[in-house]
Image (cartoon, helix red, strand yellow):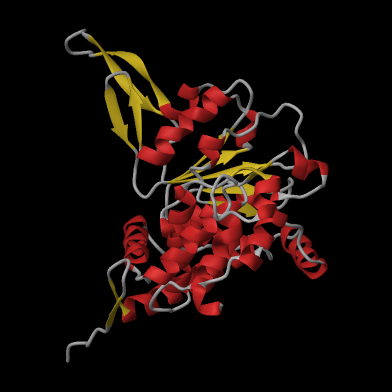
Amino acid sequence: MALAIKTTEAATGGSVQVDVIEKLARQRDALLDQLAKVIIGQRDVIDNVLLTIFCGGHGLVVGVPGLAKTLLIRTLGRVLDLSFSRIQFTPDLMPSDITGTEIIEEDPATGKRRLEFLPGPIFANLVLADEINRTPPKTQAAMLQTMQEYEVSLGSKTHPLPRPFHVFATQNPIEMEGTYVLPEAQADRFMFSIRCGYPTHDEEEKLVRHTTGTETPLIHPVLTGPELIEIQKLVRAMPASDEVLHYAVKLVSRTRPEDPSAPSFVKEYVRWGASPRASQYLILGAKARAAVSGKLCADHDGVRSVARQVLQHRVLTNFNARAQKITVNDVIEKLLSDVVPSRER
């Protein structure tokens, strides 16, 4: 007997199959089980990394050394069965060290020489840009085209990157010596800014016990690259009502001090607000949150659940805020408190 498949539709997006949504929730649980074999705690970090992957985006992971940022991304590549590449960003790193270069090769048969493209480490499904702020802006800019256009241009030729393609960059927030500020244009390419905190006492005890013994956890792939691409298509097809879309845009527009609807505290403390890309990522994140939760459409709670990750690296405070020790997170929390969906008024 053929299986009757239910679908749901709404204003924004397309139609989704209920059984496919349920399958995604099971796949996410399987991913969490495999990652938990290696990563102790950091549940919110893992959750945000998976949401970034399911949306087809890139992530900026911020945390002090020793919090398993690199281990998490490498393990993620294994459970997703993706090719993985790590680039250690240093002050002497050149753009060609990332994207690749052309070398001269001689044809043994004809003796003629030709230029042959030698791909750089960016040609992988999952790329870890470790300590991205330790390299000059010229090299950081080499990442811009790859993250936005999914291709590398060299001379007159363009080389497409493998799909799926995701960049996760790490930053150390406490050591600023020898670092370069990440340009706003590049920071805006990252869907989420993901903050890593210290583990709890119990989690740290478990971590030490697992990492100082002889046991090596066995990791099994859960998804393949093509399956991940299908999930990303599913997320984009998730419905989102006009009301939810209106709320996301209203939240972002009120981060801009020049906007007539911006609250007084934004005009007083914010130098630069979030771009329209933030609105796009709020909706995509809400769709992904709904999909992995087994819901049939994106909702206001989904938008609010990803607002901090989307906005905290896009809203820039001014001197007045710094003088009064007002942080970006303070501004975002105040916005989430003051700007509520119309149905809640």
Question: Against 136, is 36 above or below?
Answer: below
**Between 180 and 327, which is closer to the camera in this rendering?**
327
Residue pushed farthest bottom? 1
Determine the residue positioned at 53% across, 62% down.
Answer: 219
- Vertical relation: 180 (above or below) 235: above
- In this orientation, does residue 215 appear? no
Can residue 277 be seen in the rendering of this structure?
yes
Q: Nearer the viewer, residue 171 or 97?
A: 171
Could you tell me residue 112's position as x and y percent?
21, 8
Q: Quadrant of the C terminus?
A: bottom right
Picture coordinates of residue 29 (x, y %)? Answer: 50, 74
In-front residue for pair 93/112: 93
Residue 177, above or below 74: above
Give the position of the N terminus as an image quadrant.
bottom left
Q: Residue at x 41, y 54 (%)?
A: 56
Q: Percent x, y for residue 239?
A: 34, 71
Location of residue 54 in the rendering, given as x and y in whole percent from the top left corner: 43, 60
Residue 134 picture quarter = top right
Total marks shown come to 0
- Give the residue displayed 23% in from the left and 13% down from the top: 108
The single residue placed furthest to the top in the displayed view is 111
- The image quarter containing residue 22 is bottom left
